[in-house]
Amino acid sequence: MASTFTKRILGNSTDGKAILVAAIATAGTLIHTGDTVTSTFDEVWLYAVNSSASSVKLTIEWGEATAPNGNIEVTVLPEAGLVTIVPGLILKGNATALTVKAFAGTASVIAIHGYVNRITV
């Protein structure tokens, strides 16, 4: 059986629009929830925009909130446009769906854009 690829919006996005990171600590703002089917893989692409005049530390909680294993940290420069944060990393389907969450050093100045390529084998 051939694999199928489907481009999808992020699980917590409304109509493909940006997700504002309101959280300033764990557990972060929900960005995406993976599938519960173990033969499904989500290739996740995330981009951040910092609308403030100061650099802001952004933490992505990748599948878990445990530091450092589940954390991806990056400082997003002010007004730098779209900055690649997650370049197509994979989340495997799990009976208990894995999540991607985010929190930032300043509330409500980082917006997350992106999409998911869902791969079913």
Image (cartoon, helix red, strand yellow):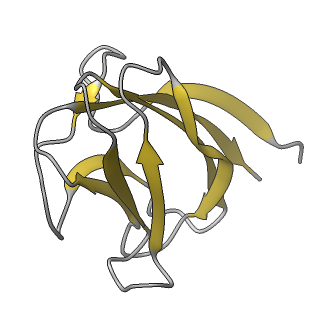
Residue 92 x %, y %: 60, 65
Most foreground residue, 28 or 94:
28
119 sits left or right of 15 in the view:
right
66 sits left or right of 90 in the view:
left
Residue 8 x %, y %: 51, 27
Q: Is residue 91 above or below residue 14?
A: below
Q: Is residue 4 above or below residue 24?
A: above
| Residue occupying image coordinates x 40% and y 34% | 10
Q: Quadrant of residue 116?
A: top right
3 sits left or right of 45 in the view:
right
Most foreground residue, 82 or 79:
79
Most foreground residue, 31 or 84:
84
Most foreground residue, 37 or 61:
61
Q: Is residue 103 above or below residue 110?
A: below
Query: Could you tell me how many numbered marks the image carries?
Result: 0
Q: Is residue 43 above or below residue 53?
A: below
| Residue occupying image coordinates x 27% and y 35% | 54
Q: Quadrant of residue 11?
A: top left
Residue 66 x %, y %: 36, 85
102 sits left or right of 36 in the view:
left
Residue at far front of view: 54
| Residue occupying image coordinates x 76% and y 36% | 4
Residue 58 x %, y %: 35, 52
| Residue occupying image coordinates x 12% and y 35% | 108
